[in-house]
Image (cartoon, grey):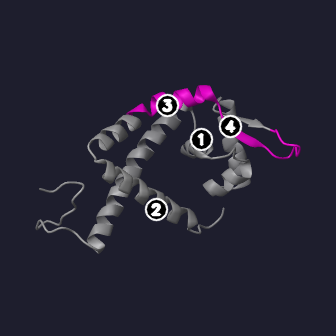
């Protein structure tokens, strides 16, 4: 029996090597496409651009308050594009900018709690889908998937991309 967890070619033989890597790439692209579909719908509902939603995710996921410069590096945008993005997010009530250090030039970005609630309710189907996939997986499968995704994200973050 073919399952998503046991990639096989048409003959029923377990895929290995290049085939397994291709199957993984297909599944990652499919998941990225599905998440992008939700991101675009949220952006449209909020009157934002998809890049604005990426910025929100980066601000939310950051271990420490982001600065516009770090956000620019993360998103690979020009400083002008990041300023426009932050202006839209601030006008829409999603973020606030704060100057809280002794150096008044340093601006920190914060996700507003009310906006966080709106995003949480909109993306609840994504959370439910993740919970359903997790429930169908054993603890070791989940741990392996998390390790793989963390390693994959680490590899991707080290990739050099052309700056804008």
Of marks 1 and 3, which one's residue comes earlier in the chain?
A: 1
Q: Measure how far apart labels 2 and 1 are at the Cα level.
A: 20 Å
| Magenta stretch: includes residue 115 | yes
- To which residue does mark 1 refer? 60
- To which residue does mark 2 refer? 152
Residue 109 image point, x, y percent: 71, 40
Of marks 4 and 3, which one's residue comes earlier in the chain?
A: 4
Q: Which residues are magenta?
A: 99-125
Circle 3 residues within 10 Å: few <14, some 14–19, many ≥20: few
Of marks 2 and 1, which one's residue comes earlier in the chain?
A: 1
Report the quarter where the C terminus lies: bottom right
Element carrying mark 4: strand
Residue 86 image point, x, y percent: 69, 41
Circle 2 residues within 10 Å: few <14, some 14–19, many ≥20: few
Circle 1 residues within 10 Å: few <14, some 14–19, many ≥20: some
Q: Measure how far apart labels 1 and 4 are at the Cα level.
A: 8 Å
Q: Residue at x 24, y 56 (%)?
A: 5
- To which residue does mark 4 refer? 110
Circle 4 residues within 10 Å: few <14, some 14–19, many ≥20: many
Name which quarter of the figure residue 55 lies in: top right
- To which residue does mark 3 refer? 120
Front in this rendered view, residue 122 or 79: 122
Element carrying mark 3: helix
Q: Residue at x 32, y 48 (%)?
A: 139
**Position of residue 140 in the picture relative to residue 11 (left or right):** right
**Position of residue 109 in the picture relative to residue 151 (left or right):** right
Front in this rendered view, residue 72 or 8: 8
């Amino acid at each position: 029996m073919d399952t998503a967890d046991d990639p096989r070619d048409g003959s029923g033989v377990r895929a290995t090597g290049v085939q397994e890597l291709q199957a993984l790439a297909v599944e990652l692209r499919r998941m990225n496409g599905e998440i992008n579909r939700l991101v675009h719908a949220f952006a449209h509902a909020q009157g934002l651009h998809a890049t604005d939603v990426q910025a929100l995710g980066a601000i939310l996921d950051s271990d420490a308050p982001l600065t516009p410069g770090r956000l620019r590096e993360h998103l690979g945008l020009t400083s002008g594009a990041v300023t426009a993005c932050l202006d839209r997010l601030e006008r829409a009530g999603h973020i606030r900018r704060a100057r809280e250090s002794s150096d008044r030039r340093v601006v920190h970005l914060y996700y507003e709690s009310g906006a966080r609630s709106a995003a949480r309710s909109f993306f609840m189907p994504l959370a439910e889908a993740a919970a359903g996939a997790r429930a169908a997986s054993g603890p070791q499968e989940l741990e392996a998937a998390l390790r793989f995704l963390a390693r994959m994200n680490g590899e991707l973050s080290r990739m050099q991309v052309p700056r804008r």
